[in-house]
Amino acid sequence: MLPQVFDNKKNYMQPDATDKKILELLQQNAQLTIKEIASRINLSVTPVHERIRKMEREGFIDRYVCLLNRRKLGKSLLVYCHVTLDKQRKESFEDFNQAVTGMQEVLECSVVSGNFDYMLKVVVEDAEAYNQFYQLKLSALKSVLHISSYFVISEIKYTTGIPVR
Amino acid sequence: MLPQVFDNKKNYMQPDATDKKILELLQQNAQLTIKEIASRINLSVTPVHERIRKMEREGFIDRYVCLLNRRKLGKSLLVYCHVTLDKQRKESFEDFNQAVTGMQEVLECSVVSGNFDYMLKVVVEDAEAYNQFYQLKLSALKSVLHISSYFVISEIKYTTGIPVR
DNA sequence: GTTGAAACCGGTTGTCT
DNA sequence: AGACAACCGGTTTCAAC
């Protein structure tokens, strides 16, 4: 008998071609009924249902959300920021991570390679609201040394769907 | 009687506080049943149902999607790119917009203010896959003059939920 | 993997307040 | 505009193939 470490194939399960088709459809429209998905990929409802549940259990499907129209809700301004931290302070990164996680205006925040430390994506009402955010929240953090702001003039493409082929 | 241009309040309908609570919940978890939402905001199912349908009709709710775990699906590398176009060529922007819209690796693409023209968010398998994308797809476009790539080392925050308060 | 059936539950609609 | 109840359709589970 093989030692346990070699006996766990099921933990490394990967979606097959059929699973990937299902994921593609759900990434575009999570409201599709199982019935509808089944008919599009020429299967019956039972296996489609089982595949979806399995992928949810295994963590391939993170969660289901609705996407709102930010303009309609008055959040017309999108800004990408480059942030550089003060490396002198040992706890800068932890402090900044925690602060940013709590800011509703910040949709995305990543540590990046290059001549600055963080890339942020920020959503606010307008230029004045961004000024408030910039002055009172972001640059107010002790860990922040420098910020560059890039205002979005036109959104060409936005999708949450990752390639699954 | 008022001229027609003043007689269209319904076209400028905005969500009230109850609507916004519903949107907040659906942004976090679109699988919540109407029943569950109703109980959380102390209403019965009928008004919740009507409010959701209205916001879908009016375009406040764009669509419902499922979010996948990109690492589990082998797309481990996230890259932000700054792209500068060749302004000599009149049709550069249209060409670039169209090309990028068709690239599955590009999740986000925006025209920005500043010392470059576009901000892109790209998802690929690994460094080698990014090299392929960079060499064969992005820098292969005639309209592209310059590209700077910023590799994501650590994703601190990612949400699709915009602030609705 | 398929079919069919059955139980269940949520969405949907109409009526009433 | 909200509550209540009845109906309909999809989900979920099961058995048998």
Image (tube, coloured by chain):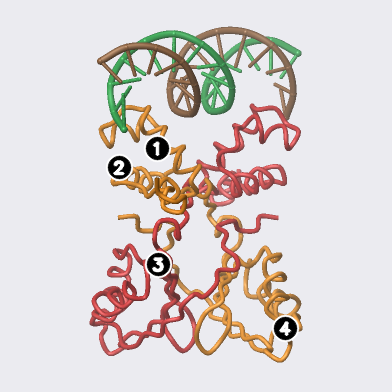
Chain colours: A red, B orange, C brown, D green
Task: Quote the CA–CA distance across marks 2 and 3.
Answer: 22 Å
Q: Quadrant of residue B26?
A: top left
Marks 2 and 4, Cα distance to the nearest angstrom? 48 Å
Name the chain letter of the residue that bears numbered label 4.
B
- Amino acid type indicated by mark 2: Thr
Q: Can you give x and y, in whole percent of width and height, for residue A92 in the image?
A: 28, 80
Image x and y of residue C12, in percent = 50, 25
**Number of other residues with Cα within 10 Å of mark 3, as a class: few under 14, some 14 to 19, many 20 or more:** many
Disc 2 packing (10 Å; few <14; some 14–19; many ≥20): few
Kind of residue sitting beneath label 4: Ser
**Are the residues under badges 2 and 3 in a single subunit?**
no
Disc 1 to disc 2, C-alpha distance: 9 Å
Name the foreground residue: B1 vs A64. B1
Question: What residue is rendered at 57% in x and 46% in y?
Answer: A8
The lab-note entry on whether marks 2 and 4 share a chain reads yes
Q: Residues within 10 Å of mark 1 (few under 14, many from 20)?
A: some
Mark sitting on residue B143: 4
- Where is B106 relative to B25, above or below? below
The residue under the point 69% across, 32% down is A38
At mark 4, the secondary structure is: loop
Q: Which residue is mark 2?
A: B18
User: Mark 1 and mark 3: span between their CA atoms?
Assistant: 25 Å
Q: Secondary structure at mark 3?
A: strand
- The disc placed on residue B51 is 1
Which of disc 2 and disc 1 is earlier in sequence?
Answer: 2
Locate residue D12 relative to residue A139 in the image: left or right: right
- Is there one chain holding both mark 1 and mark 2? yes
Discs 1, 2 touching: Cβ within 8 Å:
yes
